[in-house]
Amino acid sequence: MINQVEHWLLMLFRLFLILSFSIVLLQAQSNIGNVEILAKNLSKEGNIVHAKDDVVLYSDKYIITADEAYYDNNSSDLELIGDITIMEGSTFSSRSGYAKLNMNSDSGSLTPMFGFTGSSKIWIKCNEAEFDARYYITKNAIVSSCNVQDPDWKIGFTSGKYDKEDQYISTFNTLFYLDKVPVFYLPYFGFSTDTTRRTGLLIPEFSFGSDEGLYYMQPIYFAPQDSWDVQLDPQIRTKRGAGIRGTLRFADSPYSKGKITVGQFIESSDYMEKNNLRNNKHYGYTVEYDRSKLFSGYFSEKVEDGLWIDFQYLNDVDYLNTVDNSDSDYDALVQSTMNYYMKRDLDYIGLYAKYYIDTSKDSNDDIVQELPTFQYHRFTSSILEDNIFYSIDYSVSNYTSKSGLEFVSNQIDAPIGIHFSFLDDFFQFKFSEHFYLANVDYDEGVKAADGHIVQNYHDFSLYTELAKPYEDFLHTMYFGVNYILPGNISKSDGWKELENDLNLDEFDSLILNTKEHVSFNLIEFFYNKQGRMLVSHSLRQSILMGDLATNEYKYQDISNDLKIYFTSNLTLKNLLYYSYEFSRFSKFQTSFDWKLDEYKTSFIHTYQKDKKDKVDNYLTLSLDTDYVQNYNFFTSLSYDVEDSFFKSWQVGWKMQKKCWDYRIMYKEEIEPDSSSNGSTNTNGIYLIFNLYPIGGISYDFTKDGKSAP
């Protein structure tokens, strides 16, 4: 049996044949415009036109095919019999065996009805439907986007309607089925059949956890204008509490977009006491704004500028954990950023700000904020001769904290250099002289003091870049030697005093690391005849020279980075650092990615040991297989070898077809929260459904416990 979609294509093909080769044509006039009827057999008796065999009728709104049709010129009533297709533009088509339609009012009925919504692939099926110029009204119908004869999923409802103008389906007494098995019930359900922005309810989120109870979030969407919209996300967790989040999205110009989000979640007293949480309310807000051509539109076309704001405030990390029911991982340190730049030719100015919140602390008064930093940069350009170059970089930063620490720093770096080649461009030589000045002024917090440092250093580079083709591959290589020689350094008395009294990272960053040293760099690549990379390799070594401090070692760690691309589906990577000082590897990282037909695996192992013998030793592993068509088995883990615990692991199964997918998995993970223990160990079974194009529904059966890894 030919399915409905294939049948429509045949009918459409037949329609064009009939239009092209029709043997009979009759034009009838109605009070809504011309109606044209084509058929093999056509007759007229009074006001009634009777068409039979390969009937095609079209007007300004409809294209209709049927086995037989009766049309009343006076009333504009149309009766259709047998194998009926009604096409209303490209958004909706219907099939039926018997239909009545008034061409003047665009109302009528279909018995039975099969409707198809076009690009969304959603279809509606019922025994009887009524319609008017805007709505199709159905009873005891089903909806799906799967195979018509035996759908993998479907939605059944006792009554519903399809809004042709808004392309929106509303259903009442709704029952969701997987195959023929009912899964859950909703008294009302609605969804869009296209991507047009419109006010209404979005897809809800469901889940169940043994610790938090039933989770339900119902997004409410408002789209009053094209330039902005609002989304409200009220939620409830029956054993934990309730909250709401609101998001305003807007575009205030053709070159910008922004988003403002405000939210709060209130814990129940029982849950708060049981889990020893720091706060009973978790609240916060975010502001995101991205714009180009903020001021540059007032200048010449050569000027460009841009503004990016990503500001976030929250009282603790559980605000992020209760935003929704996703598996997102959040860092305890939250950073807010504001960046603005303006550029013209070789000149660049920037204005930056950074604000930090450490959610693991009860107080953030001692955190130093960067509010703001101003930078001017002159890109490298030639002077006097093409091989003589210079650049300028100036920045001023204001650092502040609520504990009273405040200081301002100024930094200037102005290198000037020369570049030339010799031995027929076999060798390249570059020399640059760097002039650096830093000034710091502490206003409060330590003791009122200021100071400055002036220093210069010499930078010598000798390098070669080579390429040689072989019979089966191409080899390119860069080898260079770089020598840094410190020049003079002058420190004011105030600087020396601050240097002795303070141990601040912000202060230390103002001192250039210009120890006399020489560094060697080897970078090489191998390509096959088709241009695909086979191997990439880099080797770097730095050697300190001159007088060394007590905590310095002459031979710095050597690094070796090797990547081997056996095929486009098989890659091996290795990165290692070897410490001469301790005669051991300070870092060793190996990764392996392999995809073979239906199998895909990834493995990463990292081991590193610092000078204080602190060891990080962990591995991550993932494995996927699509051995059975449309089915995917997956597993992954993250294991801390040093402390012998699983940070997270999961194993699951996924089925994916064109009209839906589902995923079931077991997962354990440790997440930071605001409890005194600092983390939650969550484990449970997750079941997730995605029905195309309606959206997703998820269940999770979890058990939470406090732990301190």
Image (tube, rainbow, N blue to C red):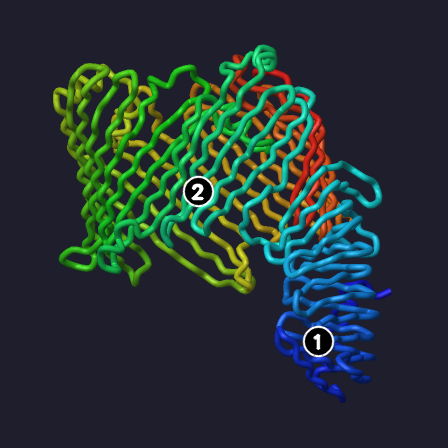
Residue 272 screen position, x and y as percent: 57, 14
Q: Are marks 1 and 2 in contact (CB under 8 Å)?
A: no
- Residue 85 vertical placement versus 324 (above, below): below
Can you tell which of label 1 and label 2 is closer to the viewer? 1
How many other residues sit within 10 Å of disc 1, few (<14), some (14-19) or many (≥20)? Answer: few
Residue pictured at 68% horizontal, 21% vertical: 703
**Disc 1 designates what residue?**
74
Quadrant including the C terminus: top right
Residue pictured at 25% horizontal, 32% vertical: 512
Taking 607 as reference, is 162 left or right?
Answer: right
Residue 210 screen position, x and y as percent: 69, 21
**Disc 2 designates what residue?**
539
Taking 351 as reference, is 672 left or right?
Answer: right
- Residue 561 vertical placement versus 109 (above, below): above
Residue pictured at 67% horizontal, 23% vertical: 213
Taking 218 as reference, is 340 left or right?
Answer: left
Q: Quadrant of residue 301?
A: bottom left
Q: Amino acid at mark 1?
A: Asn
Residue 535 screen position, x and y as percent: 53, 51
Q: Quadrant of residue 235?
A: top right
- Residue 413 vertical placement versus 405 (above, below): below
How many other residues sit within 10 Å of disc 2, few (<14), some (14-19) or many (≥20)? Answer: some
Provide the secondary structure element on which disc 1 rests.
loop
* Residue that extends furthest to the bottom in the rendered view of this protein: 23
First in sequence: mark 1 vs mark 2: 1
Residue 77 screen position, x and y as percent: 73, 70
Quadrant including the N terminus: bottom right
Q: Give the CA separation, mark 1 to mark 2.
A: 90 Å
Residue pictured at 82% horizontal, 74% vertical: 67
